[in-house]
Structures are given as structure tokens and as C-alpha cells.
Image (cartoon, helix red, strand yellow):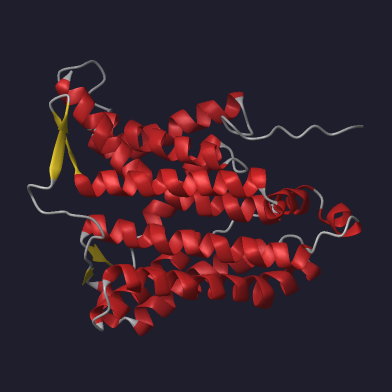
């Protein structure tokens, strides 16, 4: 039982990162109705900027704050300069632009930060010495992971308040559901789209820095697998549900941890283990989506005919 609790806590730790990046995907989707395939690389680029600022002598928290502010401006610029003109020409064009942005930002990261290919040392925002952990039911969980988990919960609460309690959140939902009708009722559609991308970029900047702190380094390949699993988590929880993204991310982390530590003397251990933990996680997601295509907490759209 103690080992099981340890595996669950470990899964919640890595799942917190999936949840944070998934929140960025949800923000863009709720504001634009699109999936931002460049979310991971936007987070990576912001994390490298954070590393550079820290390397120049700034405190890590200040470096993250400046990087997040720059990410906000960059996210807004991407929507205004790339996504908006592309969407006017074709509904599918923003998808192609996002994929191109994914590749472009990865290449730019390698160009501006040449040593990132081998990995750059990155500090943690929370205590991460070997003895910085607490015991829960006989299982140990690092203070650093608790800090990341708390950040995820706080950001989820803030996003929930944004979407449910503010006019901006209502406008984001309106624009995503029906842009034409949103314009007719006076919603500033362009500003809402710009804000959605900017906010998602900020979430990515924070999530990337937290992930790099856990890994103790950042490299140009750091966010690729994280993005894939975060996208899966957002899909599992529901692309229009911040709470669903968090639950999806945490669930995916726990599934990976349990499968990766599957006992060797149990039935099926020949094909269940650390080598197949990601495949098993995606298989479970596939089964869930076959039953509920909108995700566990996503809104089911009803079309009148």
C-alpha cells in the first residue's frame, strides 16, 4: 500500500506539469476554437529567456515574471500578426501556421541559445535539496513537487474565476462558440482572440520554467513529449474545461506512474511496464473518447437540424 501511495504521488507530480500546459491549450481553444500546436515550443522559448535572464544575475522569480510579461506580448503579436491574417483566408490556415510556428520556434531556440542542444542548467523555484521532502502515509513527496501542484491549483482557480465570473471569460466563450454572433452583440472579437493567445503564452512560460526546474535543465527537446501528453490530457478532460484539463493531466500522470511501476510478477507484466506506459495511457484515453468524444468534462455541442 505504501508503494502504491508513492506511485500515485509521483504521478501527481509529473501530472501537474501536463495539467499546466494543458491549461494553456484550453485557454486558446475557449477563446478561438483552435488547438495551438505551438504551445509547447512557445513555453520552451520563454523558458530559455528565463534561463538567460537568470544567467545575467536576476533572481529566478523576477526572471520568470519578466519572461511571462514578454510571453504575453509575444502571444498577442502571434495572434495579430500571424493567426488573424491567416484565418481570414482559410479556416484551416491557422492550423498550418501553428505547426510552422512549432518548428520555427524550435529552430530559433537552437539558433539563439546554441548550448541548449546539450541542455542548460536550470534552478528550481522551490526547495529541491535531497532532504527537502515530506512524508505522507509512509510515502515521500518532494517539496518542489508540492509547490508545482499548488501553482497548478491556484492557476486553475484563477482561470475558473476568469471564465465564470468576468465579462472577459463570457466573451471568450461567446467568440469560440459563434464569432459572427459575438460581433453582432458587440463583443470585441479581435481583442478577445489576442488576449486568449497572450494568456496561453503566459501559462506556457510558467509551466516551462517549472518543468525545467524539476529536470534541473532545459534543452530544445524538453517540451516536445510534454506537449503531446498535455494535449492528450486536455482532450481527455475536455478542451473547453480548465478543471477537466487539470484532472486529465493529473490522471495521465498517475496512469503513467502506475503502468511504469507495474509489478513484474503480475499477469501481463510482459507487455505492461515502463516501456509501454505512454502507449497504455493513450489507449485508455482512446477508450474514454470513444464513449465520450467531448472528453470527461467537455461541453457536448447540440446542433439543431
Along the viewing direction, whichever of 255 and 12 lies nearer the viewer: 12
**Which residue is outermost to the top?**
267
Along the viewing direction, whichever of 7 and 140 lies nearer the viewer: 140
Question: Residue 6: x, y in percent?
Answer: 19, 30
**250 w.r.t. 116: above or below:** above
Q: Residue at x 30, y 79 (%)?
A: 52
Residue 262 visible from this viewpoint: no
Hey, which quadrant is residue 76 in on the image?
bottom right
Q: Residue at x 21, y 65 (%)?
A: 123
**83 w.r.t. 145: above or below:** below
Assign the N terminus to one quadrant of the image: top left
Side (left or right) of 81 relative to 120: right
Hey, which quadrant is residue 291 in on the image?
top right
Question: Residue 152: x, y in percent?
Answer: 41, 47
Side (left or right) of 10 relative to 237: left
Side (left or right) of 180 relative to 52: right
Assign the C terminus to one quadrant of the image: top right
Hey, which quadrant is residue 206 in on the image?
bottom left
Question: Residue 28: x, y in percent?
Answer: 61, 56
**So how many labels did they put on this image?**
0
Question: Residue 34: x, y in percent?
Answer: 66, 55
Side (left or right) of 101 relative to 226: right
Q: Residue at x 24, y 37 (%)?
A: 10
Residue 293 visible from this viewpoint: yes
Q: Residue at x 7, y 47 (%)?
A: 131
Amino acid at each position: 500500500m505504501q508503494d502504491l501511495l508513492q506511485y500515485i504521488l509521483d504521478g501527481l507530480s509529473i501530472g501537474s506539469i501536463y495539467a499546466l500546459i494543458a491549461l494553456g491549450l484550453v485557454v486558446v481553444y475557449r477563446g478561438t476554437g483552435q488547438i495551438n500546436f505551438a504551445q509547447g515550443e512557445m513555453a520552451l522559448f520563454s523558458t530559455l529567456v528565463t534561463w538567460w535572464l537568470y544567467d545575467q544575475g536576476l533572481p529566478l522569480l523576477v526572471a520568470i515574471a519578466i519572461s511571462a510579461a514578454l510571453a504575453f506580448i509575444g502571444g498577442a503579436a502571434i495572434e495579430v500578426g500571424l493567426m488573424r491574417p491567416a484565418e481570414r483566408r482559410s479556416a484551416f490556415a491557422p492550423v498550418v501556421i501553428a505547426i510552422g510556428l512549432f518548428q520555427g520556434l524550435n529552430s530559433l531556440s537552437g539558433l539563439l541559445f546554441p548550448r541548449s542542444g546539450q541542455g542548460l542548467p536550470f534552478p528550481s523555484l522551490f526547495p529541491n535539496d535531497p532532504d527537502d521532502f515530506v512524508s505522507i502515509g509512509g510515502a515521500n513527496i518532494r517539496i518542489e513537487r508540492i509547490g508545482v501542484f499548488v501553482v497548478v491549483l491556484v492557476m486553475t482557480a484563477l482561470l475558473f474565476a476568469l471564465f465564470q465570473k468576468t465579462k472577459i471569460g463570457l466573451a471568450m466563450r461567446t467568440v469560440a462558440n459563434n464569432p459572427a454572433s459575438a460581433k453582432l452583440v458587440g463583443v470585441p472579437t479581435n481583442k478577445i482572440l489576442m488576449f486568449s493567445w497572450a494568456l496561453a503564452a503566459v501559462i506556457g512560460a510558467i509551466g516551462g520554467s517549472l518543468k525545467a526546474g524539476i529536470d534541473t535543465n532545459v534543452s530544445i527537446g524538453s517540451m516536445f513529449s510534454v506537449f503531446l501528453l498535455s494535449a492528450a490530457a486536455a482532450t481527455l478532460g475536455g478542451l473547453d474545461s480548465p478543471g477537466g484539463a487539470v484532472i486529465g493531466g493529473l490522471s495521465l500522470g498517475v496512469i503513467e506512474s502506475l503502468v511504469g511501476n507495474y509489478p513484474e510478477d503480475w499477469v501481463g507484466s510482459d507487455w505492461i511496464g515502463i516501456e509501454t506506459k505512454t502507449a497504455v495511457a493513450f489507449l485508455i484515453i482512446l477508450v474514454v473518447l470513444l464513449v465520450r468524444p467531448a472528453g470527461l468534462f467537455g461541453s457536448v455541442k447540440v446542433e439543431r437540424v
